[in-house]
Image (tube, rainbow, N blue to C red):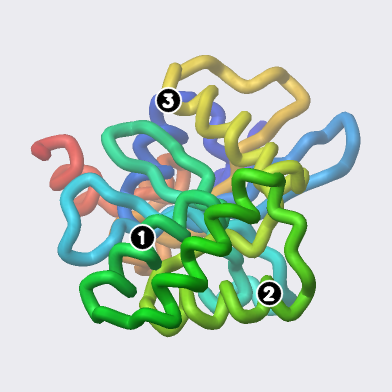
Amino acid sequence: MSHPHLITDIDAAATFALAGRATFTVRNTATGNHITFRIDAVKGEDDLYEVRAFTGTENTRKDHYSVLGFIQGGQYTYRGMGAAVPELLEAATEADDEWLINFCKSMLRYQANGWDLSEKQVKSLVKNLRRNRIKVSAVSEDDPKAKGFAWVWKRLQARHPFPPSVQFWHEGRCGRCGRLLSNPDSIQRGLGPECAGLMAAA
């Protein structure tokens, strides 16, 4: 008998993932490894979701999850520094900030040469991105968490079932509203009855 928090249907897992406030863990029973992810709908934006991976020590706190990238129109994009610098340059140009414009141009040159940055330059880049509210992943694209999510999302988007050794677990709360689930049917799908109805009608 399967655990009620284990979603085995790939369609149900894909629906849960884009419910708006989904936290789930993907576990590989063959290796014993597991990674927890959050996918949150971005407020004020249609069909835009922020993807995070648990990298801290407190799994109930959003700030203990690191940004990996975004999903829009069903397509997942890793959010590395390379994607963020042009946005920072645009913000600097709009603000007519000459220092920041020159800084961005130097970053773009470094990007063209493979991001050979000093620790001081990395800190300066991250500081300027945060100051301008531009989110960028602190997790390398080669990190198992980033690679793991890209693999998971490819399966979910294609509705291609996971191998028998890979499990998709939800946390016991509605993936749309975040309320604790108590109804056995709701627990099994990861969505409360009202939220499931609203998503089906959308």
Pointer 1 or 2: first along the chain = 1
Amino acid on which the number 2 mark rests in the picture: Gln
Q: Is residue 67 above or below residue 82?
A: below
Which residue has dot 3 on it? Answer: 157
Q: Which mark is residue 11?
A: none
Q: Secondary structure at mark 1?
A: helix
- The 10 Å Cα crowd at callout 3, few under 14, some 14 to 19, many 20 or more, is some
Q: Is residue 184 above or below residue 151?
A: below
Which residue is at a point 44% across and 37% down the rendered structure image?
A: 76
Amino acid on which the number 1 mark rests in the picture: Glu
- The alpha-carbon separation of the residues under discs 3 and 2 comes to 37 Å
**Near-viewer residue (89 or 75):** 89
Which residue is at a point 40% across and 25% down the rendered structure image?
A: 11
Which residue has dot 2 on it? Answer: 121
Quadrant into which the C terminus falls: top left
Amino acid on which the number 3 mark rests in the picture: Gln
Which residue has dot 1 on it? Answer: 87
- Residue 33, image x, y percentages: 83, 44
